[in-house]
Amino acid sequence: MVQYSKRRLDQTFAALSDSTRRGVLLQLGQKDTSITKLAEQFHMSLTGMKKHIGILEQAGLVKTEKKGRVRTCKLGTCQLDSEMAWIEKYKEIWDQRFDALEIIVQELKQRRENK
Amino acid sequence: MVQYSKRRLDQTFAALSDSTRRGVLLQLGQKDTSITKLAEQFHMSLTGMKKHIGILEQAGLVKTEKKGRVRTCKLGTCQLDSEMAWIEKYKEIWDQRFDALEIIVQELKQRRENK
DNA sequence: CGAATACTGAACCATATGGTTCAGTATATT
DNA sequence: AATATACTGAACCATATGGTTCAGTATTCG
């Protein structure tokens, strides 16, 4: 039950904590790909890959679209038809997601400089 | 070309996927703190907090030192570089696509304005 | 010394995760 | 129409995760 209450940051970092999923993201950066092809490429059952895609999709990192039999996966982007809201949303989402990380990095840099 | 250690990326992203642990990192950014105090602050048993600290330590995000009875936790030094690099790489890919899409949006906007 | 404090480790528990297989549905292809 | 393809969903499995309690050990304080 309960997956819905999981926070976005949790989801994103958890999605990124698996090397298969990171590999899928980088692959999708090169080329939109079907689940079957991803499964082959990462030496895994179709069902297994579908689960990974589900996790990436849940985290908003990947979007999929089914045409005929084939579900094509691509990097998650914002809505194509919402114009300028793109930039805002893009920045907002990434800021949100990596806010914590950036703060930590800032702290580390400051510490190093003040040492 | 940056070399990423798969296991370390796994560990670090997994460590960051828990909001308690992210909170601990932010707290340690403010002030070095004992495990007991962290446990109180995050409303958790001492043993539970100790586990979190172990995970953060394993990922190299936190360092600890025991003096007398008290184990003091502090931020680990400069461990997030490769994680940032990975994210940057992903963002780079995203940006490339974003730029391409943005051009289309610009065109659409211009069309509408000129209509 | 004796008691309180701070941690450590083992055992336990419920749920999540990363994978599988198997059986099914929907869509091409021949 | 028959078969192959691509996905979907359920069930299962082993291990990991996030937490707990309980029983210690070591250190400090009165």
Image (spheres, coloured by chain):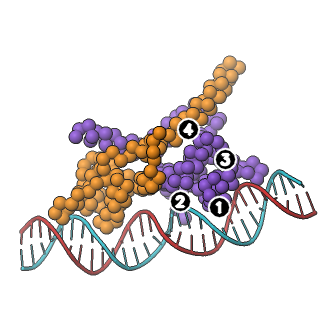
Chain colours: A purple, B orange, C cyan, D red
Q: Say which of B104 and B78 sits in front.
A: B78
Residue A45 image position (x, y, % from top left): 65, 61
Q: On screen, B62 above or below A87?
A: below
Q: In which quarter of the image is the N terminus of chain A?
A: bottom right
Badge nearest the viewer, 4 or 1: 1
Q: What element carries label 3?
A: strand
Residue type at mark 3 is Thr
Instruction: Return the residue at label 2.
Output: A3
Residue under disc 1 on the same chain as residue under disc 3? yes
Find disc 3 in the rendering and name its residue.
A33
Q: Which of marks 2 and 3 is nearer the N terminus?
A: 2
Mark whose residue sits in front, 1 or 2? 1
- Circle 4 chain: B
x and y percent of residue B46 in the render?
29, 66
**Label 1 is found on which chain of the structure?**
A
Q: Which mark is residue A45?
A: 1
| Quadrant of the image containing the C terminus of chain A | top left
Read off the residue under disc 4.
Answer: B94
Tags 1 and 3 touching, CB below 8 Å: no
Identify which amino acid the numbered label 1 is placed on. Answer: Ser
Q: Which residue is drawn at 36% across and 58% down?
A: B58
